[in-house]
Structures are given as C-alpha cells and as structure tokens.
Image (cartoon, rainbow, N blue to C red):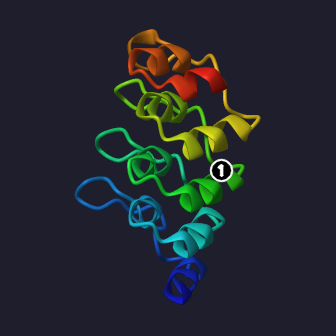
C-alpha cells in the first residue's frame, strides 16, 4: 500500500495506465481482493474508477464475480464510482448481481441511493427481470 501511495504522489505516474487486457491498477487491486490497495487508489487524485478494460468492464463489474463484499464497500464509498454504468454487453452492476444471487452484494448495491433500480441492462431488461429469469427468489423479493 505504501508503494501505491508513493506512485500516486508522483505526478509522472499514469495512475490509469492499462495493461494488455485494459486493466488499471484499481481494477487489478479490486479483482485480487486487495481492499487496502483499492481504498488508497479509489481516493487517489486522478484515478478513474469507471475506466473500462478492453472487454468494457470497470473495477466494479470485474470484482462482482469474486464476491468480495469489502471491495464493493470501498468502491461504493467513492463518489467517483458510477454505480449505474453499463458494460459494453449491457449489464449494470445491479443486473449482474441480480442474476447471480449474491445477496450480500445485492443488498450493498440496493443500499446505495445512487443505484437506479429500473435501469435496464442486458437485452433491455430491468434487474428484476434478470432475477426472475435466473430464479433468484430472494433477490426478487428485495427488488
């Protein structure tokens, strides 16, 4: 974490530099569950948490499959994080978690007042439709 702070303080370092997959330091920290690294990066000057990789996924989208509640808390704590940003394939963070049944992540997203519950995702369907289609009854009840 100290190295990350040093890099953030050096104006010559591109804090949004993407690797060969389009992943940024923030997205790599998020998918690897490095909560303290995510915390330092998401609050860092110039860091863009909404920068998509070459597949169109942001840090918030990428880590959802890892089910890391702490990383999501940190990402959601930043005003810079666009909680409604859709992937190139159309999924928003809420449509992703609604179709996976990850209840803790779903509850965290639903607790964020910025989240649009009716924003359509893949194929123009709202999160509720994704939850119904995939049989996530508990998510259906929450939505």
Q: Is residue 43 above or below residue 112?
A: below
Which residue: 36% across, 29% down?
88
Q: Is residue 130 above or below residue 76?
A: above
Give residue 137's position: percent from left, percent from top. Answer: 51, 23
Which residue: 73% across, 39% down?
111
The answer to whether residue 129 is left or right of residue 19 is right
Give residue 113's position: percent from left, percent from top. Answer: 77, 35
Q: Is residue 78 above or below residue 94?
A: below
Give residue 32's position: percent from left, percent from top. Answer: 39, 66
Any part of residue 50 in sight = yes
Which residue: 58% across, 61% down?
70
- Label 1 sits on residue: 76
Any part of residue 47 in sight = no
The answer to whether residue 123 is left or right of residue 7 is left
Query: Please, what secondary structure does the residue beneath circle 1 have?
Result: helix
Residue 14 or 124: which is nearer the viewer?
124
Give residue 94's position: percent from left, percent from top. Answer: 54, 31
Which residue: 40% across, 15% down?
133
- Most extreme residue toward the front, as rendered? 137
Quarter of the figure with residue 117 = top right
The answer to whether residue 15 is left or right of residue 109 is left
Q: Quadrant of the C terminus?
A: top right
């Amino acid at each position: 974490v100290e190295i990350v702070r040093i890099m953030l303080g050096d104006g010559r370092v591109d804090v949004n530099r993407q690797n060969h997959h389009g992943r940024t330091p923030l997205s790599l920290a998020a998918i690897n569950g490095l909560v303290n690294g995510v915390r330092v990066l998401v609050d860092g000057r110039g860091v863009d948490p909404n920068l998509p990789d070459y597949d169109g996924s942001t840090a918030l989208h990428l880590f959802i499959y890892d089910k890391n509640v702490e990383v999501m808390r940190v990402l959601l704590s930043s005003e810079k994080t666009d909680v409604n940003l859709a992937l190139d394939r159309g999924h928003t963070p809420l449509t992703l978690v609604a179709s996976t049944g990850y209840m803790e992540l779903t509850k965290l997203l639903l607790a964020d007042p910025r989240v649009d519950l009716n924003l359509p995702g893949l194929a123009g369907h709202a999160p509720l439709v994704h939850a119904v289609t995939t049989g996530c009854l508990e998510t259906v009840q929450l939505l």
